[in-house]
């Protein structure tokens, strides 16, 4: 049965959206012009939730906002699949948005997509990859929900180390890169794109792929639209600063959060402001996972917060401790030891010297 | 918290959604804040900030506002962003009217 509340979801033994990978594979394999429609097929048994029961059998037109929304699972354990309908089948779309009450109660991935993004990872056929457990903190006595992985999340087939929370976008860092470029009010120059592409085509961390050209263009367009022609973050990437990859991974995750997960118009100041902190937290944890892997490959076994504590871009701000607390709370991150912080400072010193 | 706006020439044509502001934290640490992103600049009094301090970002031309004591100290808060946004909009308006409140440094 489905959890009714977020807290129940966290307490429940969670499995994962095992249909997602096959859905995405089919989505990519069947051309949209030849198969313009898809029918929602749910597993209609005793465990089906009212939302999926409502959606079952409806026909959606691919490439529409509702397709983007419902082609992915709606909740933990969602078993949604699709039957793709050829253009000459004579079928018509009959999709309607479900009642808000159903979405609120059962559509956790729609209601709070960033919170649940972690759970949208593909399953192995024979077992779950993680469960949530409630554990009592030995020092504070506080009960917390902890994610336990049965497999090393960095070894999940088809996913890249450090990007395990962005499974829906296939092989890249940014879903909907072209949509971002289209939405942007300012585009990067061709020279900037080529220089940035050169920087971002050489990953400093094994297992992380080079950025695609469309993703580089999307980052440039996103940054310039937000901060104008002289955006600093974009400049650091174009110039190949030591922080270029760190910034690119962060910006890519942030763009992905706005466009592909939250589905907001990030050029609208009010819409952006309402979810800015969530998107930034999401981007920061992606950035930190990238840095954790980088540190590991450099011989430093460091937790996320040790790296963040010594992050030279952020550590001297007055609210850095507060920001670290937000990260700690959102992602249940362990508190680093003084020795780990010292090691993190050495890691930062090393990458600042050795990267372009 | 003391702060100064950084206005780039292109801002006059396109008002950025997230303007740049430099804030002085404890111990005269200077940090650029833009939205919720931060970039550490270095340690010096904010009154002494010059374009040279922005060299890492390849800034060749910019206008720095006067130093202002901001009412909101939480750089991650909406209130802070709104205060900076309003200040930046007003500063741009003044610049467009060619009545800059302070001279360009250096």
Image: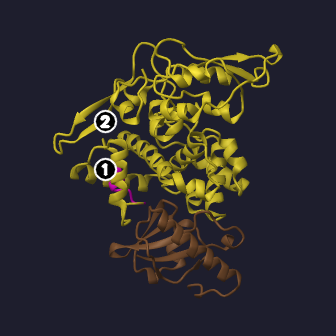
Secondary structure, mark 1, is helix
Tell whether position A312 is magenta: yes
- Rendered view: A82 above or below B26: above
Q: Chain of mark 1?
A: A
Q: Which mark is residue A145?
A: 2
> Residue A90 appears at what percent x and percent y?
82, 16
Where, quadrant-wise, is the N terminus of chain A in this rendering? Answer: top left
In the figure, is residue A64 to the left or right of A14?
right
Q: Which mark is residue A282?
A: none
Tell whether position A231 is magenta: no
- Rendered view: A246 above or below A131: below
Which chain is in brown here? B
> Residue A261 appears at what percent x and percent y?
56, 40
> Residue A257 appears at what percent x and percent y?
54, 44
Instruction: Same chain for labels 2 and 1? Say yes or no.
Output: yes
Q: How is the image coloured?
A: by chain
Secondary structure, mark 2, is strand
Which chain is in yellow here? A
* Mark toward the start of the polypeptide (2 vs 1): 2
Q: State which region is magenta.
A: A306-313
In the figure, is residue B95 to the left or right of B105?
right
Q: Which mark is residue A306?
A: 1
Residue at image point 61% right, 78% down:
B90
Residue at image point 37% right, 25% down:
A130
Viewer can see residue A148: no
Residue at image point 70% right, 67% down:
B14
Q: Chain of mark 2?
A: A
Residue at image point 52% right, 25% down:
A158
In the figure, is residue B96 to the left or right of B36?
right
Viewer can see residue A345: yes
Task: Locate residue B1: give its quadrant.
Answer: bottom left
How far, Cα to Cα, is label 2 from label 1?
21 Å
């Amino acid at each position: 049965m489905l959890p009714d509340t977020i807290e129940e979801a966290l307490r429940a033994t969670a499995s994962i959206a095992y249909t997602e990978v096959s859905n995405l594979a089919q989505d990519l394999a069947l051309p949209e012009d030849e198969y313009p429609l898809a029918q929602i097929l749910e597993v209609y048994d005793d465990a089906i939730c009212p939302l999926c029961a409502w959606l079952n059998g409806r026909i959606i037109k691919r490439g529409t906002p509702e397709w983007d929304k419902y082609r992915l699972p709606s909740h933990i354990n969602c078993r949604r699949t699709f039957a793709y309908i050829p253009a000459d089948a004579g079928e018509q779309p009959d999709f309607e948005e479900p009642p808000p009450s159903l979405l609120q109660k059962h559509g956790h991935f729609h209601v709070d997509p960033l919170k649940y993004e972690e759970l949208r990872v593909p399953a192995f056929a024979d077992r779950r990859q993680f469960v949530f457990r409630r554990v009592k903190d030995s020092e504070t006595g506080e009960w917390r929900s902890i994610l336990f992985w049965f497999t090393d999340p960095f070894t999940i087939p088809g996913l890249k180390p450090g990007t395990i929370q962005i499974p829906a976008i296939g092989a890249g860092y940014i879903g909907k890169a072209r949509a971002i470029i289209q939405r942007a009010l300012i585009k990067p120059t061709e020279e900037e794109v080529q220089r940035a592409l050169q920087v971002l085509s050489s990953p400093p961390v094994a297992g992380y792929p080079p950025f695609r050209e469309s993703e580089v263009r999307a980052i440039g367009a996103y940054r310039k639209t937000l901060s104008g022609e002289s955006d600093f973050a974009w400049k650091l990437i174009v110039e190949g600063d030591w922080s270029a990859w760190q910034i690119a991974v962060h910006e890519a995750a942030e763009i992905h959060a706005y466009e592909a997960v939250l589905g907001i118009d990030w050029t609208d100041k009010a819409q952006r402001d309402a979810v800015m902190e969530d998107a930034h937290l999401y981007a920061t944890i992606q950035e930190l996972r990238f840095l954790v892997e980088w540190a590991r490959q450099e011989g430093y076994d460091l937790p996320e917060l040790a790296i963040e504590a010594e992050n030279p871009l952020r550590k001297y701000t007055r609210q850095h401790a507060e920001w670290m607390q937000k990260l700690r709370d959102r992602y249940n991150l362990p508190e680093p030891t003084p020795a780990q912080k010292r090691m993190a400072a050495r890691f930062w010193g090393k990458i600042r010297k050795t990267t372009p | 918290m003391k702060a100064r706006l950084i206005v780039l020439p292109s801002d006059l044509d396109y008002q950025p959604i997230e303007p740049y502001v430099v804030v002085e934290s404890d111990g005269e640490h200077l940090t650029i804040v833009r939205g919720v992103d931060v970039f550490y600049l270095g340690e010096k009094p904010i009154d002494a900030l010059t374009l040279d301090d922005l060299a890492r970002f390849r800034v060749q031309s910019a206008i720095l506002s006067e130093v202002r004591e901001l009412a909101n100290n939480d750089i991650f808060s909406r209130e802070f962003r709104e205060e900076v946004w309003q200040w930046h909009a007003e500063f741009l308006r003044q610049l467009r009217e060619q009545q800059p409140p302070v001279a360009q440094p250096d």
